[in-house]
């Protein structure tokens, strides 16, 4: 039997008596009694079609009567009610009325908890998660952060049905704001950030489908970028938070992996904690992350052969392009230090294959070209200066993929251009003509244009 027919049957059964009319709110019953029950059922049947069509203006009056008179009638009152009140908020300009509507939205959640908080599929803890998301959204900078955190944290800790990306995002945002208001909340924020990545991955691997996959990935990117900009990623502070814990957890591989990943994301790969955690983790369960930690520790000791061994191991264990880009670039840096420029360029290009949108490999290659100029053409000063053409070509490419380094790269370009052959030198040189393509010799073997 369709829901509309069910409501009609109930209405006909209960509507015959007006003697005992009483609302559901007053009687503690689902629909109320007598004529009040009939009015409740009629209002529900009238508002629902409009709400489903998102015609909240027409739904509003009927919904408000049902919401106030028979609050236990259906949890759909609250599912639709949130959308209806949010629509009201979006339409209201008067500050006093807007404040009242925000309270009304919170009351919709509170009333749902009162009447349907024991719902097996969507109990109080999950309702609080959505309430927390909307509380932060509608109150903005005026939100009571401790109150928001309590709602979101209860929901997150329950993990009922797993936390949705929206709830995780709001939880991390509030954690960050509480930290910025009070630095004593730093460790809570850091731990919540780490947990958020774990929870989002869990959601991706089990529940996310279609558009939610992309949305969840975007949330992961958002919380990571927010963390990097938050100020909590200070290496000295992280050292003080995690330093002592590493020794206590030296056999806890999950903790060690989490710590290594956090320190890497925070660009703290030179910290003692990063090295120690990597060493303990690598003994238990070698991963790309732990191998990179061992490699960087070897680099710090100037043991470049050992570093390359660990980086090669890391490359074999790597599962993402980001990891591979980082590993190959680090190997390029080592070969550059050894002045093995051809090998360094090989790994810089491997890094670019893994991540084409990074500028550092191009900058490294440009510097190697510039440093090779006199070695490639030791007896021809003018040809040696043409090497800077190729260096600038790489810098222009670097600038095209990474606008954040424009000022730094432009400074290098200006410096290298000052070393180009003069117009007179180009005119007088038998092998050069402005505008023609030439091939730079030596290990470079790259075409460029005479300026």
Image (spheres, rainbow, N blue to C red):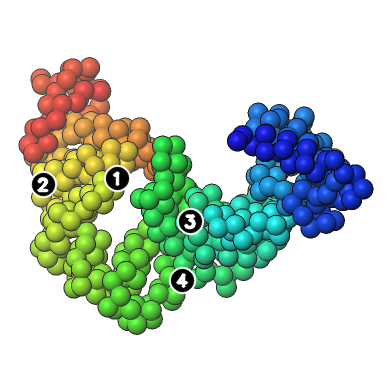
Q: Earlier in the sequence, mark 2 or mark 4?
A: 4
Crowd tier of the residue under label 4, counting other residues whose Cα lies within 10 Å: few below 14, some 14–19, many 20 or above: some
Q: For the residues marked 2 and 4, what is the alpha-carbon distance in whole angstroms? A: 38 Å
| Secondary structure category for the residue under label 2 | helix
Crowding at label 3, few (<14), some or many (≥20) Cα neighbours within 10 Å? few
On the image, numbered disc 2 is attached to which residue? 343
Q: Position of residue 190 (x, y in %)?
A: 47, 65
Please tell me which residue lies in front, 346 or 266.
266
The CA span between labels 2 and 3 is 51 Å
Task: Please tell me which residue is depicted at 60% across the width and 35% down the height of the picture.
Answer: 1
Instruction: Give residue 104's position: percent from left, percent from top.
Output: 78, 49
Between the residue at mark 1 and the residue at mark 2, the CA separation in whole angstroms equals 16 Å
The one nearer the camera, 407 or 177, is: 177
Label ID, residue 161: 3
Q: Which residue is mark 1?
A: 360
Q: Position of residue 338 (x, y in %)?
A: 12, 55
Marks 2 and 3: which is nearer the front?
Answer: 3
Seen at 18% across and 73% down, the residue is 283
User: Does 365 sit left or right of 191 as displayed?
Assistant: left
């Amino acid at each position: 039997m369709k829901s509309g027919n069910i409501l009609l049957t109930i209405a006909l059964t209960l509507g015959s008596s007006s003697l005992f009319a009483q609302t559901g709110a007053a009687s503690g019953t689902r629909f109320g009694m007598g004529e009040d029950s009939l009015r409740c059922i009629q209002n529900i049947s009238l508002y629902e079609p409009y709400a489903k069509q998102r015609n909240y203006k027409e739904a509003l009056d009927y919904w408000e009567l049902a919401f106030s008179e028979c609050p236990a009638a259906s949890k759909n009152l609250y599912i639709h009610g949130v959308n209806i009140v949010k629509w009201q908020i979006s339409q209201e300009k008067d500050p006093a009325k807007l404040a009242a509507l925000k309270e009304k939205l919170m009351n919709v959640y509170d009333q749902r908890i009162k009447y349907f908080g024991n719902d097996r599929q969507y109990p109080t803890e999950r309702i609080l998660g959505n309430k927390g998301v909307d509380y932060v959204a509608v109150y903005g900078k005026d939100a009571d952060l401790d109150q928001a955190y309590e709602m979101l944290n209860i929901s997150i800790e329950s993990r009922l049905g797993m936390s949705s990306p929206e709830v995780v995002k709001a939880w991390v945002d509030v954690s960050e704001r509480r930290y910025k208001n009070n630095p004593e909340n730093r460790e809570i924020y850091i731990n919540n950030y780490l947990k958020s990545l774990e929870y989002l991955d869990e959601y991706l691997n089990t529940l996310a489908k279609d558009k939610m996959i992309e949305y969840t990935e975007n949330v992961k990117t958002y919380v990571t970028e927010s963390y990097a900009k938050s100020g909590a990623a200070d290496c000295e502070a992280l050292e003080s938070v995690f330093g002592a814990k590493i020794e206590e957890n030296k056999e806890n591989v999950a903790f060690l992996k989490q710590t290594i990943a956090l320190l890497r994301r925070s660009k703290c790969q030179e910290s003692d904690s990063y090295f120690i955690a990597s060493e303990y983790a690598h003994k238990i369960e070698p991963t790309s992350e732990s191998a990179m930690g061992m490699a960087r520790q070897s680099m710090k000791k100037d043991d470049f052969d050992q570093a390359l061994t660990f980086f090669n191991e890391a490359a074999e264990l790597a599962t993402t392009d980001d990891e591979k880009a980082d590993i190959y670039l680090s190997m390029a840096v080592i070969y550059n230090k050894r002045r093995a420029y051809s090998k360094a360029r090989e790994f810089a290009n491997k890094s670019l294959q893994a991540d084409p949108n990074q500028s550092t490999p191009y900058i490294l290659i440009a510097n190697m070209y510039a440093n090779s100029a006199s070695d490639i053409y030791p007896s021809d000063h003018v040809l040696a200066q043409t090497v800077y053409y190729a260096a600038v070509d790489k810098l222009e490419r670097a600038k095209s993929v990474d606008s954040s380094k424009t000022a730094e790269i432009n400074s290098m370009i200006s410096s290298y251009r000052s070393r180009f052959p003069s117009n007179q030198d180009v005119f007088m040189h038998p092998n050069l003509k402005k505008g023609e393509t030439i091939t730079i010799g030596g290990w470079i073997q790259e075409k460029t244009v005479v300026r």
